[in-house]
Amino acid sequence: MTMLHQAKKVGLPLMNLVRFKGVPILEQLHLEEKLLRASSDNWCIVNDGTNAPAIVMGISGKPSELLEIGPVLQDHIPVIKRFTGGGTVIVDCGTIFVTLICNNEDVPGVQPYPRSIMSWSGLLYSQVFQGIGDFQLRENDYVFGDHKFGGNSQSITKSRWIHHTSFLWDYEVRNMAYLKLPARAPKYRSARNHNEFVCRMKEYMPRSVFIERILKALESHFSVKPINLEAVDGSHMAGYVHFTRLLSKQELEAAMTSVLESRALCG
């Protein structure tokens, strides 16, 4: 870094940047949870795809209401319940994950409430997508026009917050069949099925350009410092207990039994 570049960064809060490619989403979520709870630094995690398809649900999500459990069990699709809120998504190698973990005091003007954090993140990503598509923040989703390509989840502690986004750079149409149409959906969805509701980012921009633009946008708010995984996953965080977990086969089977019993009663 040149002296001029260093001078420009004076006064900006430090943000550690961790870049992955193909790290399992369960491993990434465990890391995020540790960094939110056990670190006092700002972090950005960029994971370019996950190694295998998996379903990720919010902390209050119920498999019986959100998943087509029969096909999920039949095809051995892992189901993860994460420690943050938000909706349900199926992720794979076509998903790009971007997570921001920030101290309240390092993001001026942002209150530690979901709407305030979303408003700030919407402005950040408007820099990323400037001149590309009809980018908007709509009801907590990132969209081009009325088609969703980015879903968000958040968690807020006393002095810190996390904003996690799953970006659909690409997706397999058949995988969307594992997800039910949620009872609580944004109004702009208008009861459209998954394939009518979402779009692929690859139709708008190259994958590498998207990631480069994220880093450039972050540099207008933070002094960004790349860091490797070994430095992140240090011994001071060893033994941390995670709330993010993989649902067992027994739990999914019990949820399926509940669905079948409910259908029998209604029938």
Image: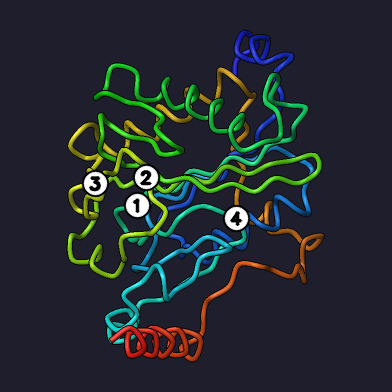
- Of the residues shown, which amino acid type is indicated by label 4? Thr
What residue is shown at x 34% (from left), y 18% (from top)?
Answer: 130
Q: Residue at x 74, y 35 (%)?
A: 103
Kindly identify which numbered label has been placed on residue 84: 4
**What is the number of the mark on residue 95?**
1
Q: CA distance from mark 4 to mark 1?
A: 18 Å
Distance CA(mark 2)–CA(mark 4): 17 Å
User: What's the distance in space between the residues labelled 1 and 3, CA to CA?
Assistant: 16 Å
Write down the residue under mark 3: 197
Q: Secondary structure at mark 1?
A: strand
Foreground residue, 157 or 17? 157
Check residue 167 in the rendering and tell me which mark sits there, or answer none. 2
Q: Is residue 98 above or below residue 138?
A: below
Tell me if mark 2 has few (under 14), some (14-19) or many (20+) residues whose alpha carbon lies within 10 angstroms of its own: many
Q: Dot 3 lies on which element?
A: helix
Mark 3 or 2: the one toward you: 3
Left or right, residue 42 beside residue 158: left
Looking at the image, is mark 3 or mark 4 nearer the viewer?
A: 3
Mark 4 element type? loop
Quadrant of the rendering where the N terminus is positioned: top right
Q: Judging from the image, what secondary structure is the residue with disc 2 in? A: strand
Check contact, mark 4 vs mark 1: CB within 8 A: no
* Separation of residues labelled 3 and 4 (CA atoms): 23 Å
Residue 114 versus residue 131 in the image, above or below: below
Mark 1: amino acid: Thr
- In the rendering, at what x and y percent does residue 251 appear? 51, 86
Q: Position of residue 85 (x, y in %)?
A: 57, 54
